[in-house]
Amino acid sequence: MKLKTFQIGSKREPNAGIRLGVVRYLPRGVKKEDYKKLGLFDLWFPALAPSRKLLEKRGDKNLFARYRSEILNNSESRQTLLFLAEVARKTPISIGCYCSDESKCHRSVLASMLRAAASGELPKK
């Protein structure tokens, strides 16, 4: 699988492929046509970002479990996840968020779910 993660605004790494901003909100004060030019991300991909409702509960100790549930229990999100996993099996992609600590960020959970989906091990729900 050709999958990496990154912090939005960080320098592009070699073999990063398509850099997807998997965030709910776009960067403030930046024109849409400048996202790629400034190296933030190539495409905004909010389909796999946490919902607004979930983002309101940032301090919740069950945040990652709730995020997984959001993705797995919503057919559009689940199909988007499966599609992206298939793409990442053939083409390099990177998923990014604003968080500086990936271990506390939804992108770590998303990367794990993408790897599981690519290997056929994604739970039914």
Image (cartoon, rainbow, N blue to C red):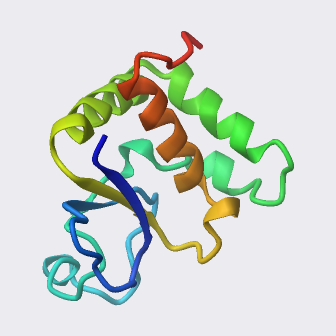
> Which residue extends farthest top?
124
Which residue is painted at 32% across and 33% down in the image? 85
Q: Is residue 30 above or below residue 92?
A: below
- On the image, the x and y values in percent for residue 66 come to 70, 36
Q: Choose between 94 and 69: the one closer to the eye.
A: 94
Left/right of residue 38 with respect to residue 75 in the rendered view? left
Residue at 20% x, 76% y is 32
Horizontal and vertical percent position of residue 69? 63, 27
Q: Quadrant of residue 8 in the image? A: bottom left
Residue 85 in the image: above or below residue 60: above
Residue under the image location 42 percent in, 69 percent down: 6
In the visual, does 54 lie left or right of 113? right
The C terminus, quarter of image: top right
Residue positioned 36% across, 27% down in the render: 118
Between 37 and 32, the one lying in front of the other is 37
> Viewed as shown, does residue 58 lie left or right of 23?
right
Asked which quadrant contains residue 115, the reply is top left
Q: Quadrant of the N terminus?
A: top left
Which residue appears farthest toward the right when viewing the image?
61
User: x, y percentage for residue 81?
Assistant: 37, 32
Number of numbered discs: 0
Task: Please determine whether, in this image, residue 35 is positioned above or below residue 96.
Answer: below
Q: Position of residue 108 (x, y in %)?
A: 57, 52
Q: Is residue 31 above or below residue 68?
A: below
